[in-house]
């Protein structure tokens, strides 16, 4: 793919998806907190809870708490407030939870002087068109992502998690400041695992992505730091 535009180099969020603290810390201790963000998802948060978030804060990291809330508005309101109390930098909720749920989450952050960025998950990067059809949604995956991005923006969210190739359309729909966070980053020889909408680090140059989320490309690598440096070089 040729370079069509000159976009900023995306910042890197490392998905800390491990099943124990020891392995997670092995990687964390190699990372400079002023260069990388950490994403704590359902696995690590379920195992280690908020104490782990505090420990990572003490090391100087900004945390994306990727719990992808999806529930009735009242529950999401309270959960969002509880998450913001942890002092995290970014929080995810499922945009498909609907307008009332999204507005409720935004409202929950009103009282915080320094609030986390509130990010809507559009379509998981693991989803295919067939997966979407299987749950009764007959529009194209691309339209689905655009509709949920616009809805999230209208409800006051700060950005969305979406496949990189949709970033340009979303920015033109929702504004340039609207944050685009893209998982599914894979180098050419990496296994895609369960991800479907993948892009390589080099391809990120073609899209206005603000942050990439990198997980198994690094965590499943024998030499994570070498791989991380390769990813950084590829995006320049
Ligand atoms: O290992 P891999 O690079 O596939 O990790 C991607 C990370 O991004 C995982 O932690 C996953 O939960 C998260 N994620 C995603 N797709 C989304 C939102 C979050 O893959 N739409």
Image: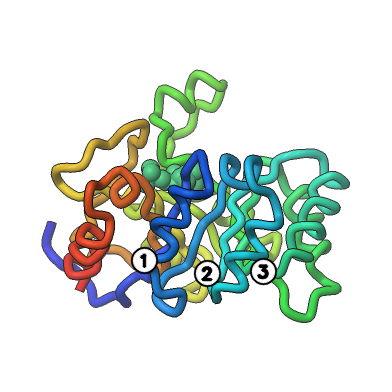
User: Farthest residue in the front direction?
Assistant: 22
User: Farthest residue in the top direction?
Assistant: 134
- Residue depicted at 55% across the width and 73% down the height: 59
Q: Earlier in the sequence, mark 3 or mark 1?
A: 1
Q: Earlier in the sequence, mark 2 or mark 3?
A: 3
10 Å crowding of disc 2: few (<14), some (14-19), many (20+): many
Compare residues 111 and 58 and report the one nearer the observer: 58
The reply to whether dot 2 and dot 3 touch (C-beta < 8 Å) is: no
Q: Is residue 80 visible?
A: yes
Q: Which residue is mark 2?
A: 178
- Residue depicted at 65% across the width and 41% down the height: 46
Q: Is residue 123 visible?
A: no
Q: Residue 181 location in percent, x, y? A: 45, 59
The image's colour scheme reads rainbow
Q: Quadrant of the C terminus?
A: bottom left
Task: Find the distance from the CA under tag 3 to the CA under tag 1.
Answer: 25 Å
SS under mark 1: loop
Compare residues 201 and 230 and report the one nearer the observer: 230
Q: Which mark is residue 30?
A: 1
Q: Quadrant of residue 2?
A: bottom left
Give the vertical position of 138 relative to 126 (above or below): above
Q: Which residue is mark 3?
A: 116
């Amino acid at each position: 793919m040729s370079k069509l535009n000159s976009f900023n180099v995306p910042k890197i969020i490392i998905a800390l998806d491990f099943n124990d603290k020891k392995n997670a810390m092995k990687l964390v201790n190699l990372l400079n907190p002023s260069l990388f963000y950490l994403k704590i998802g359902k696995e690590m948060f379920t195992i280690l809870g908020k104490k782990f978030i505090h420990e990572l804060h003490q090391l100087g990291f900004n945390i994306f708490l990727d719990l992808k809330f999806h529930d009735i508005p009242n529950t999401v309101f309270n959960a969002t407030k509880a998450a913001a109390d942890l002092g995290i930098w970014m929080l995810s909720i499922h945009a498909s939870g609907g307008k009332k749920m999204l507005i409720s989450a935004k409202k929950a952050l009103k009282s915080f002087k320094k609030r986390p960025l509130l990010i809507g998950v559009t379509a998981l990067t693991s989803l295919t068109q067939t997966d979407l059809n299987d749950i009764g949604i007959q529009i194209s995956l691309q339209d689905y992502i655009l509709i949920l991005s616009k809805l999230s923006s209208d409800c006051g969210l700060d950005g969305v998690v979406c496949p990189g190739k949709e970033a340009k359309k979303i920015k033109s729909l929702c504004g340039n400041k609207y944050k685009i966070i893209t998982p599914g980053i894979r180098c050419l020889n990496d296994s895609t695992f369960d991800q479907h909408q993948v892009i390589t680090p080099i391809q990120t140059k073609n899209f206005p992505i603000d942050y990439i989320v990198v997980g198994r490309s690094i965590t499943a690598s024998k030499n994570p730091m070498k791989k991380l440096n390769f990813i950084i070089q590829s995006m320049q």
